[in-house]
């Protein structure tokens, strides 16, 4: 199905010669993981690219009239429809190419936060993936509606304190576990689905290349720490991304042609989930006396997901 | 331009609009089926399957995504069309404002149907009136011929450099969309010549000149954008007149901003949109034979509404009944409010409002007769019994 990936060595030195597509001067918070994610994504692309962006932090902070931080064609239309908007752009491209009105080869990427992807944009995303547009949808996942002030989303981790599931004497944070969107996308039998994290730029960028080279729709979920919502320091983003992976809360894996591959298995270096939770203010209450049960419960969820992911890898080996 | 060779056919309103879509050959058509507009998409996708158009369809999972894809495709730089009705338009509503705010000349066939609840699939104008504040150009059509003709003219109006706004062509669900009428098609060649090549303005796919579309605009600039949009709406009238004049030269079929029927010397005037106008015209003829000076004004262009011209055409009537096939609950019917605004500078006619035909209820000739009788009575006495009243309804 997919075209072979060009195996040019991707080194920091070679990347340093590429120009930045997202310019400095945008208004994302200092310490935010999202612009780092976007920069890595954009550095992985060699072809002309067109971007669709859901309403959210990334959108409002990078294109505030009369300024824009984008050096490539970029479009935002609403919150729940980045995938549908991108479908329209990509289809017009195919129509004009077919009619000989457009010559250039282009790639299409849609960016959405977890609110615009897991929740309100879920239907549009599912539709676009099912229809098979030549499109890479990337969710930068910070685990809540951070743009509007840290409200809970279906990507918010179990137990997290948010402004709409605030910790109180009766409710210890978010009662539900996170929706596993990457697996749901894989269940669409998309051409490529993957999870990545900005602490491992090489893995992230390789996945972007694979997603764009594949023949059909691709989905990537990328961890994007938010120091405001997670209540951490501005220099913690990369460290927290790494811990999310090392604790197996956010495993790095990919699904292509029905084959599940875990890209990083910490094996005996797998860290307890508490190491990822502890530095985050949103989980502070889980470490209070009497909350051990909740911590155990959360650890069991993560362990269960990790084991089932390993089984999926095992089962798809042939 | 010589009057073109035309072909007389017997088709439904939906088939006529689908044929217009085929001749317009849009680059992209995102759509989601909904009664009674579904027939347009069914006929059109057959054209696609048979290779009769260049169009790429996007058979989306909802009308919200249909309009979102229209917006993406139009911004990318090409012609886009879709069709919908009722709940479909309601689900699009958020995106309708964005389509016009981004100044994208998208074409929509809106086959008018009642809004739920209660659920109903038949024709009334509550969907069309529900989008009147969305900054879309709205044309209303009495029959299949008008729906076809207005669809052929739509891109020329919407894409004009002074306009660049989306456009909706309205026809009554079932009454027009599903009834077979005799009408005339224009030849493919003439349509192609009339519509011309698409002129892309700042297309997103112009990769050498990257643009950002859809910025966040705060109080420092938001209002300037909206004022520019208002100006574009103001420019529509002349463009509609010019395009219609050119269309008349090609086909012999003349379209104004509104149609008047025996209105010039009328003392008793009726105002109504779409298919009801046919029944009303018949009854006006009968009353004229009886010596009642009755006449009709049928708006074609509802947005922008040509208040000045409509006011001028109605000012000499003694009494006017505005018939609305939709209601603005707690106020008057939407068409009544426009006519009242249009007549504000004049002291002449006495106005009143009837709500009829909701959810596809028939308007029979006898119903129209009662309205004309009452309007004639008001013209005589100058006294209105009830300013707003539902008719064709159980009490």
Image (cartoon, coloured by chain):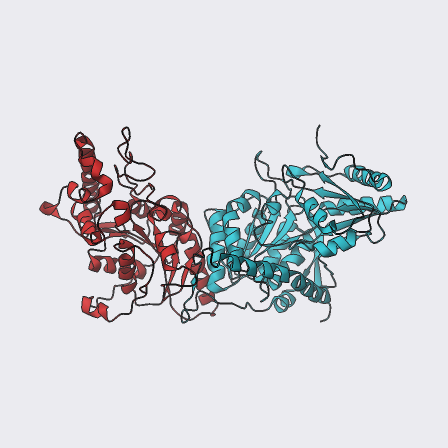
Residue B292, picture quadrant: top right
Locate residue B218: give its quadrant. Answer: bottom left
Residue B315 lies, in percent from the top left, at: 79, 51
The front one of B119 and A34 is: A34
Q: Quadrant of the N terminus of chain A?
A: bottom left
Horizontal side of residue B214 vs A21, given as left or right? right
Could you say which quadrant of the image residue A169 lies in?
top left
Residue situated in front as seen by the camera: B51 or A70: A70
Residue at 69% x, 67% y is B246
For chain B, what colour was chosen?
A: cyan
Q: How many marks?
A: 0
Residue A152, position as x, y percentages in the image: 33, 40
* Residue lying farthest to the left in this orientation: A268
Q: Is residue A102 left or right of residue B355?
A: left
Q: Tell me where residue A261 appears, x and y as whole percent.
A: 21, 51
Q: Is residue B125 left or right of residue A59?
A: right
Q: Which residue corresponds to the image point at 78% horizontal and 34% vertical from the top-left? A: B385
Q: Nearer the viewer, residue B230 or A311?
A: B230
Out of B315 and A298, give the one closest to the viewer. Answer: B315
Q: Position of residue B331 (x, y in %)?
A: 65, 39
Can residue B57 be seen in the rendering of this structure?
no
The red chain is A
Residue name at image x 68 percent, y 65 percent: B242
Look at the image and tell me whether residue B381 can be seen.
yes
């Amino acid at each position: 199905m997919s075209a072979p990936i060009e195996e040019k060595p991707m080194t920091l030195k070679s990347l340093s010669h590429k120009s930045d597509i997202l310019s400095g001067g945008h208004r994302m918070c200092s310490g935010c993981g999202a612009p780092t994610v976007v920069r890595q994504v954009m550095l992985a692309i060699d072809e002309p690219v067109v971007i669709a962006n859901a309403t959210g932090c990334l959108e409002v902070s990078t294109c505030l009239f009369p300024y824009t931080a984008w050096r490539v064609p970029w479009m935002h239309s609403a919150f729940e429809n980045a995938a549908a908007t991108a479908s329209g752009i990509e289809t017009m491209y195919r129509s004009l190419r077919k009619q000989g009105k457009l010559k250039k080869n282009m790639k299409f990427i849609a960016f959405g936060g977890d609110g615009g992807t897991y929740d309100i944009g879920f239907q549009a995303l599912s539709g676009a993936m099912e229809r098979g547009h030549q499109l890479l949808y990337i969710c930068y996942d910070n685990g809540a509606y951070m743009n509007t002030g840290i409200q809970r989303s279906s990507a918010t981790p179990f137990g997290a304190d948010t402004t709409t599931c605030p910790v109180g004497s009766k409710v210890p944070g978010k009662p539900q576990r996170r929706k596993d969107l990457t697996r749901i996308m894989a269940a669409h039998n998309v051409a490529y689905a993957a999870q990545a994290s900005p602490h491992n730029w090489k893995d992230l960028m390789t996945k972007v290349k694979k997603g764009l080279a594949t023949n059909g729709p691709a989905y990537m979920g990328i961890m994007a720490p938010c120091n405001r919502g997670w209540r951490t320091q501005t220099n913690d983003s990369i460290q927290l991304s790494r811990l999310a992976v090392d604790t197996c809360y956010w495993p790095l894996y990919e699904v292509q042609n029905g084959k599940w591959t875990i890209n990083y298995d910490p094996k005996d270096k797998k860290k307890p989930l508490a190491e990822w939770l502890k530095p985050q203010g949103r989980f502070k209450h889980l470490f209070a006396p009497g909350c051990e049960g909740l911590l155990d419960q959360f650890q069991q969820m993560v362990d269960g997901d990790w084991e089932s992911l390993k089984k999926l890898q095992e089962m798809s080996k042939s | 331009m010589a009057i073109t060779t035309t072909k007389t056919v017997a088709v439904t309103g939906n088939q006529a609009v689908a044929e217009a879509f085929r001749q317009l050959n849009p680059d992209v058509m995102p759509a989601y089926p909904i009664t009674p507009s579904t027939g347009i998409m069914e006929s059109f996708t057959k054209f696609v399957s048979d290779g009769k158009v260049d169009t790429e369809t996007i058979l989306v999972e909802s009308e919200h995504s249909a309009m979102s894809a229209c917006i993406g495709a139009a911004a990318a730089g090409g012609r886009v069309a879709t069709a919908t009705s009722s709940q479909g338009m309601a689900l699009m509503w958020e995106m309708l404002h964005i389509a016009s705010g981004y100044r994208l000349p998208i074409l929509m066939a809106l086959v008018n149907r009642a809004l739920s609840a209660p659920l109903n699939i038949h024709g009334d104008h509550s969907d069309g009136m529900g989008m009147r504040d969305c900054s879309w150009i709205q044309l209303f059509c009495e029959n299949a011929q008008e729906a076809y003709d207005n669809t052929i003219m739509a891109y020329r109006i919407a894409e004009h450099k002074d306009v660049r706004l989306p456009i909706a062509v309205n026809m009554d669900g079932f009454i027009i969309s599903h009834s077979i009428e005799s009408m005339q098609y224009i030849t493919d060649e003439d349509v192609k010549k009339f519509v011309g090549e698409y002129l892309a303005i700042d297309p997103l796919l112009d990769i050498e000149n990257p643009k950002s579309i859809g910025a966040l605009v705060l109080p420092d600039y938001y209002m300037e954008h909206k004022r520019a949009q208002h100006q574009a709406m103001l420019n529509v009238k002349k463009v509609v007149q010019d395009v219609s004049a050119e269309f008349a030269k090609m086909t012999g079929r003349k379209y104004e901003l509104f149609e008047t029927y025996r209105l010039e010397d009328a003392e008793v005037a009726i105002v109504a949109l779409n298919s009801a106008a046919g029944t009303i015209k018949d009854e006006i003829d009968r009353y004229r034979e009886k010596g009642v000076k009755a006449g009709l004004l049928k708006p074609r262009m509802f947005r922008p509404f040509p208040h000045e011209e409509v006011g001028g055409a109605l000012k000499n009537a003694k009494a006017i009944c505005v018939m609305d096939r939709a209601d603005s609950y707690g106020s008057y019917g939407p068409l009544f409010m426009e006519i009242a605004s249009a007549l504000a500078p004049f002291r002449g006619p006495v106005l009143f409002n009837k709500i009829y035909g909701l959810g596809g209820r028939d308007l029979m000739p006898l119903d129209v007769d009662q309205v004309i009788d009452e309007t004639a009575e008001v013209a005589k006495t100058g006294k209105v019994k009830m300013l707003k009243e539902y008719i064709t309804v159980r009490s």
